[in-house]
Image (cartoon, grey):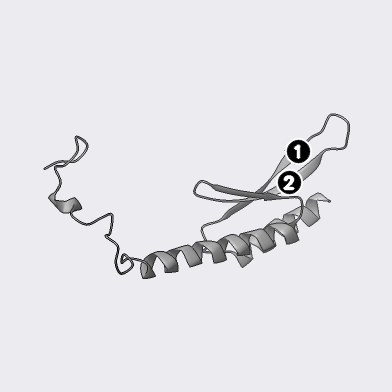
Amino acid sequence: MTDDALGDDLAGLRKEFEGSGFTFGSVWASAGAGPDARRLFASRGTLLITSWNAAALRRRVREEMRRSQQTVVGHECDNEAPKGTKSPFTGLQDREPGPWRSR
């Protein structure tokens, strides 16, 4: 992959996922017996996604965005305990505060 192609790929990824919170870049990956290559990455918070080419990285970032969207939606919809069960959060406000919380 040439430096120009790599720069174009990174620019395309940055433009496509602008506003998503992802940062894109590349790092050198070297092997003792083979040629060096550049690996692309996308990071957001503590999440790191890597790939050898832009198409695979794009696919994995989209997949992660779908997964995180489902988690948020699922969390918002799943805020009640199923019927016949007791929520693990019932009565928390009545407990004594721990040493890390103020009264």
Q: Is residue 42 left or right of residue 30?
A: left
Amino acid on which the number 1 mark rests in the picture? Ala
- Circle on res. 88: none
The residue beneath circle 1 is 29
Q: Residue furthest top?
A: 32
Asked whether the beta carbons under mark 1 and mark 2 sit within 8 Å of each other, the answer is yes
Q: Is residue 100 left or right of residue 17?
A: left
Q: Secondary structure at mark 1?
A: strand
Lower sequence index among marks 1 and 2? 1
**Is residue 8 depicted above or below 30 in this figure?**
below
Residue 67, position in %: x, y?
Answer: 54, 63
**Is residue 28 depicted above or below 16 in this figure?**
above
The residue beneath circle 2 is 39
Q: Is residue 15 left or right of residue 79?
A: right
Q: Residue furthest front?
A: 84
Measured in 3D between alpha carbons, the distance from the residue under mark 1 to the one under mark 2, in whole angstroms, is: 6 Å
Residue 38, position in %: x, y?
Answer: 76, 44
| Pick the front one: 91 or 32 | 91
